[in-house]
């Protein structure tokens, strides 16, 4: 069987493009199949990420890609209480995700990757020494297949979500706002992420909601103009048990590598692309697909415990009532918030939980948590505390 390429990647999003660049720069042939007509369109992510995370991904974005820099975050409770957080230490920026993905595509192309647009994957068949893929009625053959298409196997891991581009005079450019309300956004929240003067990404996600109706209800009494609407589900129920099966490798959202707390996946999915790329190079060099397991091991070593903590936190949060959320807001004084901010890490949410669970009053409010869940959470946080001290 004639082989078309060493690695075929389904999906031209962030993780697929990072994987493509990693492998292609070592001289292997890489093809990326993207079903849309343009890389980065539609924009499916709010683009909130720390400069520290981008640095670890080896990416210094061009000035035109950084839409905004965030200095504060304001959290709102269901009854209207608010917490003001100083975010300057975290060095958080808002990316133009469309331009960011295009930049990743240029980097992959510059080292030899081939990107084929408007090509929808339909099925694959795995053989002893190659994989045959069908897309747009055409057959492609590769030594290893990478699934980066962004649709997880776990259907239960989806939250209904939508994001609007909105114009309003009321937005403050350097402030992100988060609104908790278990009726409007059950199990998640509503967000306002400004990216230009008077322009913001306003989104909502929740269990079983109509996200368009939820955002429209949220914006009902606000003076604003809706410029764009995008629907895109969020993946929040954790990673697959395994990312590798023979000659098929799964990365990014398809592998469940987005954070269970916020659904952010630029850092965790991006590192998945880097680890996958390194393992693919090793496997191709040695002609040994057992080397692909290195990717799985590296990702779980870096994020496995963190994701267990976030998953437990998600289960607890989903059962909180609006009244309980309000009570937690009342307990969190400005001095305590400042203390938590000093010790927390934007990219590792367990650091926030460690501080929050040190407040006995908060633990008492969490009446929805079982003894077993509390023991598991305390154990995981104890491990983190020991490793990070």
Image (cartoon, rainbow, N blue to C red):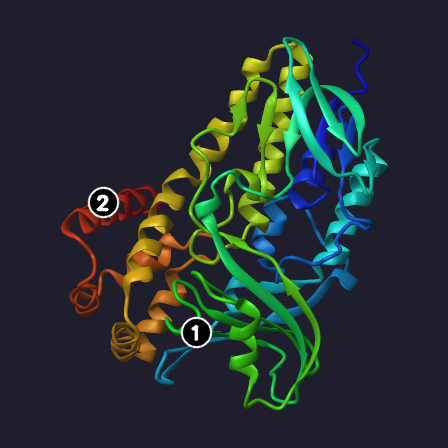
Residue 55: x and y, percent?
62, 49
Mark 1 residue element: loop
Q: Residue at x 57, y 53 (%)?
A: 52
Residue 71, can we see it? no
Asked which quadrant contains residue 329, the reply is bottom left
| Residue nearest the viewer, comparing 273 with 227 | 227
Residue 7: x and y, percent?
72, 24
Separation of marks 1 and 2 at Cα, in angstroms: 30 Å
Depth-wise, is mark 1 or mark 2 nearer the camera? 1
Residue 50: x and y, percent?
57, 58
Residue under circle 2? 376
Residue 169: x and y, percent?
66, 89
Residue under circle 1? 184
- Please report whichever mark, 1 or 2, sits nearer to the chain's N-terminal start: 1
Mark 2 residue element: helix
Query: Is 385 rendered above or below residue 164?
Result: above
């Amino acid at each position: 069987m004639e082989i078309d390429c060493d690695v075929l990647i389904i999906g031209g999003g962030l993780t697929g493009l990072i994987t493509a660049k990693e492998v292609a720069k070592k001289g292997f042939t890489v093809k990326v199949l993207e079903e849309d007509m343009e890389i980065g369109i539609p924009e499916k992510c709010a683009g909130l990420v720390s400069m520290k995370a981008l640095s670890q991904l080896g990416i210094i974005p061009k000035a035109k890609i950084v839409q905004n820099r965030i200095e504060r975050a304001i959290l709102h409770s269901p009854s209207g209480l608010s917490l003001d957080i100083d975010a300057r230490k975290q060095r958080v920026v808002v990316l133009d995700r469309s331009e960011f993905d295009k930049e990743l595509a240029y980097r992959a192309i510059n080292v030899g990757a081939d990107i084929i647009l408007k090509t929808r994957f339909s099925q694959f068949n795995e053989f002893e020494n190659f994989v045959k893929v069908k897309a747009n009625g055409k057959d492609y053959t590769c030594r290893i297949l990478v699934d980066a298409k962004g649709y997880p196997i776990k259907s239960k891991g989806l939250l209904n979500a939508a994001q609007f581009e909105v114009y309003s005079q009321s937005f403050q450019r350097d402030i992100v706002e988060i609104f908790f309300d278990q009726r409007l956004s059950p199990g998640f929240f509503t967000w306002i992420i400004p990216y230009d003067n008077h322009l913001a990404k306003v989104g909502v996600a929740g269990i079983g909601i109509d996200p368009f109706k939820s955002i429209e209800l949220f914006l009902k009494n606000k003076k604003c103009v809706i410029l764009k609407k995008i629907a895109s589900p969020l993946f929040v129920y954790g990673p697959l048990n395994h990312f590798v099966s023979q000659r098929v490798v799964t990365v990014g959202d398809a592998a469940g590598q987005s954070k269970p707390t916020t659904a952010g996946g630029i850092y965790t999915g991006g590192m998945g692309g880097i680890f996958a790329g390194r393992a693919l190079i090793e496997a191709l060099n040695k002609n040994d697909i057992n080397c692909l397991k290195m990717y799985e091991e590296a990702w779980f070593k870096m994020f496995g415990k963190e994701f267990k903590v976030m998953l437990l936190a998600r289960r607890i949060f989903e059962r909180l009532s609006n009244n309980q959320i309000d009570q937690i807001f009342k307990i969190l004084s400005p001095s305590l918030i400042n203390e938590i901010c000093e010790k927390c890490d934007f990219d590792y949410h367990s650091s926030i939980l460690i501080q929050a669970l040190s407040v006995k009053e908060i633990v008492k409010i969490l009446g929805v948590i079982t003894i077993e869940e509390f023991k598991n959470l305390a154990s995981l946080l104890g491990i983190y505390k020991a490793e990070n001290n």
